[in-house]
């Protein structure tokens, strides 16, 4: 098939199936709205136009699609190993169950794009615009997201433990059940970032701005938040065993039902923080500011509150066995509230 014959078929809406186009030069070709199935594309495709095209079970491995336009294109079960897409427009495009390992996607414009159940190991997204993009159940081992804009993006079950995220923007990003491991977030922009049920054991957020981030149900064991600005963060049901939060600014942070055994919150600003139902045996709150904080129904067995500011701090029905708590200022059991909590209907 010649280039002219291909363009004619595309122009007349004819589907292209089961052909090998490797001998063609498709630089700058207009293939918008085309339907391809089981097609082997040529490597020479720089600046190609594939807007709203559909590619099913196609082979684009090693293709040069730099500066191309794949706006609203759909690629299903296709092979794009080592493909070059630098500076391409991939706005709202979908890559479904496709192979993009070692693909070069640097500086792509891909807001609202979707990468679902696809292999992205070793792929490069340096400086890419992935605003509101969706990366669902993807393999990012060895991938680079350095300097990428992931604001408002959604990453579900993504393995980022061996990916480079230095300098990336995770503002309002949703990361659910993501795997990070012992990663440092230094230089990463975080604000209202959602880390729900993610694996962040031994990760470092030290000295970072984390205002209103959500760590619900996350594994933060041995993680570091030392000196972090984490006001109004949510740590509900998170595992913070042996985590280091000393000197962190955690005003109005919520730790409801979190695990805090042997966690270190020494010198932390915890005014109006909510610790109801936490398990914090052996935790350190030395010199912490805990005015108006609430430890109702918490387990603070053997916890150390030496030197802590505890003005009107609530310990309603908390387990305080062997805890070191300065006298005065804090509130013990509220009998009227306890009576209400014990009430059960007769029938």
Image (cartoon, rainbow, N blue to C red):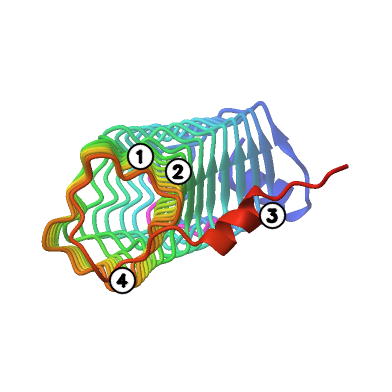
N-terminal label among 3 and 1:
3
- Answer yes or no: is residue 223 visible: no
Q: Quadrant of residue 327?
A: bottom left
Determine contact: label 3, label 1, CB under 8 Å: no
Marks 2/1: CA–CA distance: 7 Å
> In the structure shown, which secondary structural element does the residue marked by tag 3 occupy?
loop
The stretch in magenta equals: 64-70
Disc 3 to disc 1, C-alpha distance: 49 Å
The residue to which callout 4 is attached is 251
Q: Name the quadrant of the C terminus.
A: top right
Indicate which disc residue 169 carries. Answer: none
- Mark 4 or mark 3: which is in front? 4
Q: Which residue is mark 1?
A: 239
Q: Residue at x 38, y 45 (%)?
A: 64
Q: Which residue is mark 3?
A: 33
Q: Earlier in the sequence, mark 1 or mark 4?
A: 1
Which of the image's four quarters has the N terminus? top right
Estimate how packed mark 1 is, as few (under 14), some (14 to 19) or many (20 or more) residues with alpha carbons within 10 Å: many
- Magenta stretch: includes residue 82: no
Q: Which mark is first along the chain, 1 or 2?
A: 2
Q: Nearer the viewer, mark 3 or mark 1?
A: 1
Q: Judging from the image, what secondary structure is the residue with disc 1 in?
A: loop
> Between 301 and 199, which is closer to the camera in this rendering?
301
């Amino acid at each position: 098939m010649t280039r002219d014959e291909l363009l004619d078929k595309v122009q007349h809406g004819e589907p292209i199936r089961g052909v090998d186009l490797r001998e063609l030069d498709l630089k700058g070709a207009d293939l918008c709205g085309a339907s391809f199935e089981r097609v082997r594309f040529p490597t020479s495709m720089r600046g190609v136009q594939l807007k709203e095209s559909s590619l099913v079970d196609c082979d684009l491995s090693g293709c040069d699609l730099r500066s191309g336009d794949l706006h609203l294109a759909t690629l299903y079960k296709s092979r794009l190993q080592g493909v070059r897409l630098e500076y391409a427009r991939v706005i709202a495009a979908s890559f479904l169950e496709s192979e993009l390992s070692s693909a070069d996607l640097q500086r792509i414009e891909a807001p609202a794009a979707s990468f679902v159940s696809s292999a992205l190991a070793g792929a490069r997204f340096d400086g890419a615009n992935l605003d509101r993009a969706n990366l669902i159940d993807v393999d990012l081992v060895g991938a680079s997201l350095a300097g990428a804009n992931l604001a408002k993006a959604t990453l579900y079950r993504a393995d980022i433990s061996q990916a480079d995220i230095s300098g990336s923007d995770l503002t309002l990003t949703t990361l659910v059940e993501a795997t990070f491991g012992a990663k440092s977030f230094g230089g990463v922009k975080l604000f209202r970032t959602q880390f729900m049920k993610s694996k962040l054991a031994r990760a470092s957020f030290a000295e970072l701005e984390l205002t209103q981030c959500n760590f619900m149900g996350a594994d933060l064991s041995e993680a570091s938040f030392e000196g972090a600005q984490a006001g109004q963060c949510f740590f509900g049901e998170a595992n913070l065993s042996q985590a280091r939060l000393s000197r962190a600014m955690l005003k109005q942070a919520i730790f409801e039902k979190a695990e805090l055994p042997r966690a270190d919150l020494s010198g932390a600003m915890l005014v109006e923080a909510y610790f109801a139902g936490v398990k914090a045996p052996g935790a350190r709150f030395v010199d912490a500011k805990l005015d108006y904080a609430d430890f109702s129904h918490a387990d603070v067995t053997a916890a150390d509150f030496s030197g802590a500011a505890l003005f009107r701090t609530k310990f309603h029905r908390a387990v305080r066995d062997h805890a070191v708590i300065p006298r005065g200022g804090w509130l013990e059991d509220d009998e009227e509230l306890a009576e209400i909590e014990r009430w059960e209907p007769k029938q």
